Image: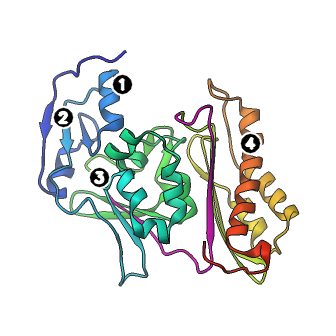
Amino acid sequence: MHRALLPFEFSEPASVEEAVALVDGGRARALAGGVDLVLKMRLRQETPERVVSLQKIAGLDHVRVDAHGGGALHIGALATLRQVEQSAAVTQGWPLLAEAIASIVSMQTKVMGTLVGNLCVGTPASDVAPALFALGARVKIAGVGDERDIAVEDFFLGPGVTAVRPHELVTEVVVPARPVGSAGRFLKLSKTADDIAKVNVAVSVAFSRGTCAHARIAIGSAAPTPVRAVAAEELLLREDWCPATAKAAAEAAARSVRPISDVRSTADYRAEMVKVLVRDALTQAADGAGVLDGHDGKEA
């Protein structure tokens, strides 16, 4: 049941330095798009004494490619999901990320919600997180007088828990340039199109003369946090591509997760669907990379 918001102090700092001083991790919460926070405040799941809006901080709404830093993609803390999804730089250079965001059917969520905010919720069912895992993204976190830079797979600590400490804010997500000839695929299984995932999977692969030279596999909604299936990746590397290799990697991926039974699915079903989705995603990504038709290395 939705209720009126309880009284709180509202702050609009003009700089990151001012914002981190106000966000104490206990009494105060940061507000970017507010999709998750406002709902939780209405449901009394969050009752902050202070809400710190980031909207007046200049320079946090960017989606740009760093031409002088290896061609990495930089996504600011105020860049909305829709902004990222529609960015020509993203659709051309990192289509896997655009594909993952496209799986979120709520236009309101994508127009209001930010990519960084989606990560900071800390849900294991995030559609964005597996894509960023597969793409090797890093997260920039500003604190009082310093800044940390961590791999996105180190950002999630548990359900609803992230690496952000008191008096810290995520300012940017940085996605490196894709390996030459790589292709990716995002697949999601949910009860209905607008429901959160029972299981989702993102993969990124590249081949050289039919042999796997690069592989990253990420899985969401099947463990306390999104996870990388490192053992499955290692099975693929330096192996010639064939259906048996994909099947073996999918089975290894299923062994890397710890699904639960809940109202959306059973643990056994989730584990089985990890096998299916990883196998299918790998097969489709390999096809996109050209390995199945004898033209491996083709951009996708």
Residue under label 3: 169
Q: Which residues are magenta?
A: 170-194
The residue that appears at 34% across and 37% down in the rendered structure is: 35
Q: Which of pointers 3 and 4 lies earlier in the amino acid sequence?
A: 3
Quadrant containing the C terminus in the rendered view = bottom right
Mark 2 or 4: the one toward you: 4
Element type at mark 4: helix
Which three-letter amino acid code belongs to the residue tagged 4? Met
Q: Is residue 128 visible?
A: no
> Contact (CB < 8 A) between labels 1 and 3?
no
Q: Which of pointers 4 and 1 lies earlier in the amino acid sequence?
A: 1
Which three-letter amino acid code belongs to the residue tagged 1? Gln
Residue under label 2: 50
Count how many numbered circles sit on residues in the image: 4
Q: Which mark, by number, is residue 45?
A: 1
Quadrant containing the N terminus in the rendered view = top left
> Contact (CB < 8 A) between labels 2 and 3?
no
